[in-house]
Image (cartoon, grey):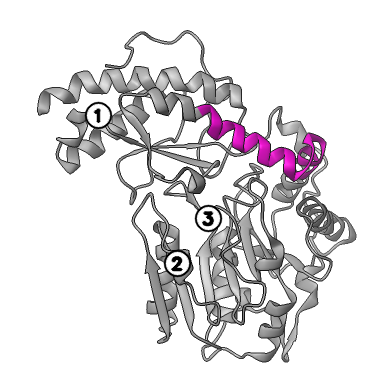
Amino acid sequence: MSSSARPAVRPSNPNFSSGPCAKRPGWTLEALADAALGRSHRAKIGKTKLQDVLDRSRALLGLPADWRIGIVPASDTGAVEMALWSLLGARGIDMLAWESFGEGWVTDVTKQLKLADVRVMKAPYGELPDLAQVDFARDVVFTWNGTTAGVRVPNGDWIPDDRQGLTICDATSAVFAMDMPWSKLDVVTWSWQKVLGGEGAHGMIVLSPRAVERLETHKPAWPLPKIFRMTKGGKLIEGIFKAETINTPSMLAVEDQLDALKWAEQAGGVSALIARSEANLAAFEPWVAQSGWAAFLAKDPKARSCTSICLVVKAPFFTKLSPDDQAAAAKKIATLLDKEGVAYDIGAYRDAPPGLRVWGGATVETADIQALLPWLDWAFAQVEAEFAAKV
């Protein structure tokens, strides 16, 4: 039995959503006071701010000088779709999927683009596919961190430097929180609303020289919408990577991203952000180890995410419940904590096994994770009293 006593200490910030994520510590609306509102993003002030986002992002991430970085429409989803529709079709493809977003990219490639030479390598929630089976003579599409499963690739050692195909990596819940081996990645995408806690709707895309070469030498067999086009006349549209965005960005969101990037610099850079995220995962580990009811969804500690921390219920009574009752019980835990103002938006993703998902990215304070843990026990005790009688 978990403790049914109401904890005395609450998290200072109850925002544990996996996207949009918690704002950086100390954030207020005053951070947006210098936004170029009512001004064109093509004007000098707009382009200067957009270029500042690119320059600060490049410097923080340590991108190689010849890697392009650009701001694109429609969040991480738009950035991934842009890469898939623009780059694939030149050779066979290995698709890796171990959670819902990876599954979505599989659907796009097999059912929308309808490419024939596709190998799909899947693993259930909580596990990784066998990375040793990936063929790098082919293009490879994968998520670095499965946001809805709490499972990440442990490193980039499985990716060879002498690969023939491109590596296309959805890293939206990994960039700024995990070590990215840029030399092994040809396309990397993310969104502002994840690790840095920015606002939604804007995506980022990084292209290696090999990816640029593919863009300039391969013409897809299908028409491309304007927001996906990165070439014109067989040449890269360099303006996309020099603050000339394809469509109109929100200058309010741009200002917010600049604030987040400046905070990241002041916090100590990417290494410090990684340490903050890893500390949040580490805070969970002793609690899970002694818990009589909670377990990590990710089975292998080396593949366990430090941003999207996913938990399942292992209590004996819970495993005997019907699938519908399991989902209802897990939802009740999240609902109780929401009503208490202790933790918002921590229910498991709708396609994932019933459980909880707590964001542990760099904008979340470890002290708030530590304050949350007794509340998880409290909420489970309430649910156990209600649902154990059903078995």
With 274 as the anchor, is 323 left or right in this view?
left
The secondary element bearing badge 1 is classed as loop
Is residue 4 depicted above or below 326 in this figure? Answer: above
The CA distance from mark 1 to mark 3 is 28 Å
Secondary structure found at label 2: strand
Image coordinates for residue 159, horizontal then vertical, percent: 59, 68
Q: Which mark is residue 178?
A: none
Spot occupied by residue 35 in the image (x, y as percentages of width and height) = 79, 45
* Disc 2 residue type (three-letter): Leu
Amino acid type indicated by mark 1: Ala
Disc 3 designates what residue? 153
Label 2 – label 3 distance at C-alpha: 11 Å
State the predominant SS element of the stretch in magenta: helix
Residue 66 shows in this picture: yes
Horizontal placement of 384 versus 294: left or right?
A: left
Residue 315: which numbered mark, if any? 1
For disc 2, the neighbor class at 10 Å (few under 14, some 14 to 19, many from 20) is many
> Within 10 angstroms of label 3, few (less than 14), some, or many (20 or more) residues?
many
Q: Residue at x 74, y 51 (%)?
A: 254
User: Which residue type carries mark 3?
Assistant: Val
Q: Nearer the viewer, mark 2 or mark 3?
A: 3
Residue range of the region highlighted in magenta in the rendering = 260-283
Q: Which residue is mark 2?
A: 96
